[in-house]
Image (cartoon, rainbow, N blue to C red):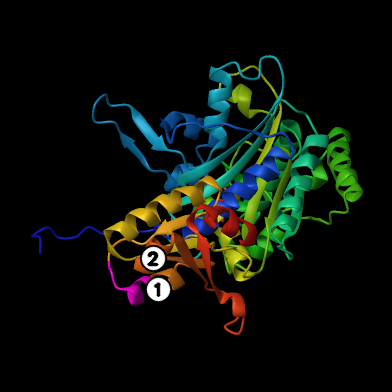
């Protein structure tokens, strides 16, 4: 035994091992196909960015920037860096830096880990994964609707029912300013029920105060002036344009006038998809329009809209339905005896792979019994046996592992040169 005291992984940062990792890969492949169906293209940005990108892009007075970011000073050059807590700011930074919006609007997606220092619990981790989709340069509401219709398709593809859509409109800056004044007045009137965080935020980010989960503040939040009631004709028309397209697509939604979302950059459309099947962390996807962000981050003004899906929560739902597949390790498991048998099995396995089959050659223990146990545990459809008799006959014994024991064709002899073709026809 080594003297080294073993090191555990970090709190809130999960390892994903087989077979669960196979569900992740299946989900990722399905998501890429789904996105391709709508013409979304992949963009890969670094995990690390300058801290000021997020403080500016997400907003100083937000949960993320106030208390959730993994930030540090680079010991080599003193840069202040942050591990991305979300994708949007990095994608917008990159689009500006590469003049990517110069000639035309873009449909972009990214998928991967993001980092937030939160209290870990079911559906809430410190490293988690997002599917992030951004439509850059489109004023909407047609593209707002496209994003939501796309999401409804994803839930259908995954066989997920009971995820409901909540919508709101945050209007434009002038409308938010008028509402803000009325809201601050309301908060000041109810200052006795506000918790410490709410008091701190009531003048800097009063809208966020309404997003509270504190039960003692619900009555105050419910009676607060609603931003939706401050919307002018243009904002309302945008909202109604979105609703009309959702109606066309047969998508049901509810207006939730208290929906504000945890980031500062949103205007007009905001939405969340929520479920009751994930306990307290019921939001699977959140998104909205952020027409001011590109300019705020130093680019030429352009409208944009996007969303992020929490992949752990999505997978949790998928697994609850028992629909998340856990593919077998291989389709064919080759067992063998002696060095000549092992070498023949290895050659045959290559031929099987040429035919597009997933094949695994046993390695390690030599006894037939333990080899068969492994073959069975691998989930393979068939075991291929290469022992002394098979070598002499130039034909493998094929044993079907998942078929009825009464099936007479359970075991058969197949010439080596026929094996790949034979198995390919039957698997
Ligand atoms: P919440 O209200 O749950 O904190 P949020 O508003 O902070 O969510 P967003 O920034 O909108 O979340 O992120 C988009 C999605 O990412 C969420 O809807 C959720 O599914 C997922 N998500 C957010 N934080 C976490 C986390 N700590 N662990 C796992 N998934 C998360
Ligand atoms: Mg959060």
Looking at the rendered image, the quarter that the N terminus falls into is bottom left
Q: Position of residue 277 (x, y in %)?
A: 64, 69
Could you say which quadrant of the image residue 79 lies in?
top left
Residue 310 visible: no
- Left or right: 146 as drawn, with respect to 14: right
Residue bearing the label numbered 1: 372
- Left or right: 143 as drawn, with respect to 19: right
Looking at the rendered image, the quarter that the C terminus falls into is bottom right
- Is there a contact, CB below 8 Å, between mark 1 and mark 2? yes
Of residues 208 and 18, the one nearer the viewer is 18
- Image point (63%, 58%), residue name: 283
Mark 2 residue crowding within 10 angstroms, few (<14) / some (14–19) / many (20+): many
- Image point (48%, 48%), residue name: 351
Describe the element under mark 2 as helix, strand or loop.
strand
Residue bearing the label numbered 2: 335
Mark 1 residue crowding within 10 angstroms, few (<14) / some (14–19) / many (20+): some
Q: How many marks?
A: 2
Q: Which mark is residue 34?
A: none
Could you say which quadrant of the image residue 423 lies in?
bottom right
Q: Position of residue 333 (x, y in %)?
A: 45, 63
Q: CA distance from mark 1 to mark 2?
A: 7 Å
Q: Tell which circle, 1 or 2, labels the residue nearer the N-terminal end.
A: 2
Would you say residue 383 sits in the magenta stretch?
A: no
Residue 64 visible: yes
Q: Farthest residue toward the left?
A: 3
State which region is magenta.
Answer: 365-371
Describe the element under mark 1 as helix, strand or loop.
helix
Q: Position of residue 213 (x, y in %)?
A: 58, 62
Would you say residue 370 sits in the magenta stretch?
A: yes
Of residues 307 and 387, the one nearer the viewer is 387
Could you say which quadrant of the image residue 144 lies in?
top right
Of residues 337 and 164, the one nearer the viewer is 337
């Amino acid at each position: 035994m080594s003297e080294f005291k073993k090191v555990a992984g970090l709190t809130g940062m999960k390892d994903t091992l087989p077979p669960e990792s196979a569900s992740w890969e299946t989900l990722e492949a399905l998501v890429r196909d789904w996105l391709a169906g709508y013409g979304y293209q992949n963009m890969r940005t670094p995990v690390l960015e300058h801290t000021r990108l997020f403080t500016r892009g997400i907003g100083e007075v937000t949960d993320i920037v106030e208390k959730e970011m993994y930030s540090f000073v680079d010991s080599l050059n003193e840069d202040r860096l942050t591990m991305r807590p979300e994708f949007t700011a990095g994608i917008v930074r990159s689009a500006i830096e590469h003049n990517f919006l110069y000639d035309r609007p873009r449909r972009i997606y990214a998928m991967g880990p993001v980092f937030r220092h939160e209290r870990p619990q079911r559906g809430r981790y410190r490293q988690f994964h997002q599917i992030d989709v951004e439509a850059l340069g489109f004023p909407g509401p047609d593209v707002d609707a496209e994003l939501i219709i796309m999401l409804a398709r994803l839930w259908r593809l995954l066989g997920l029912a009971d995820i409901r859509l909540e919508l709101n409109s945050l209007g434009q800056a002038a409308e938010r300013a008028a509402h803000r004044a009325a809201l601050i007045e309301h908060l000041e009137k109810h200052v006795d029920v506000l918790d410490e965080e709410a008091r701190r935020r009531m003048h800097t980010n009063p809208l966020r105060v309404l997003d509270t989960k504190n039960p003692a503040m619900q009555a105050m939040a419910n009676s607060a002036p609603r931003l939706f009631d401050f919307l002018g004709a243009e904002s309302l028309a945008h909202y109604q344009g979105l609703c009309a397209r959702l109606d066309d697509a047969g998508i049901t939604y509810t207006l939730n006038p208290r929906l504000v979302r945890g980031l500062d950059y949103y205007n007009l459309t905001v939405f969340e998809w929520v479920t009751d099947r994930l306990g307290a962390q019921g939001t699977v996807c959140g998104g909205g329009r952020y027409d001011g962000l590109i300019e705020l981050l130093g680019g030429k003004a352009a409208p944009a809209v996007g969303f992020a899906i929490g992949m752990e929560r999505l997978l949790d739902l998928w697994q609850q339905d028992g629909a998340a597949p856990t593919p077998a390790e291989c389709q064919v498991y080759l067992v063998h005896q002696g060095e000549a048998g092992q070498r023949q099995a290895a050659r045959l396995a290559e031929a099987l792979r040429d035919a597009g089959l997933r094949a695994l050659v046993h390695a390690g223990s030599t006894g037939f019994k333990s080899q068969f146990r492994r073959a069975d545990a691998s989930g393979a459809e068939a075991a291929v046996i290469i022992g002394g008799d098979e070598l002499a006959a130039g034909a493998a014994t094929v044993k079907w592992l998942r078929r009825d024991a009464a099936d007479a064709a359970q075991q058969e002899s197949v010439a080596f040169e026929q094996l790949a073709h034979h198995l390919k026809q039957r698997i």
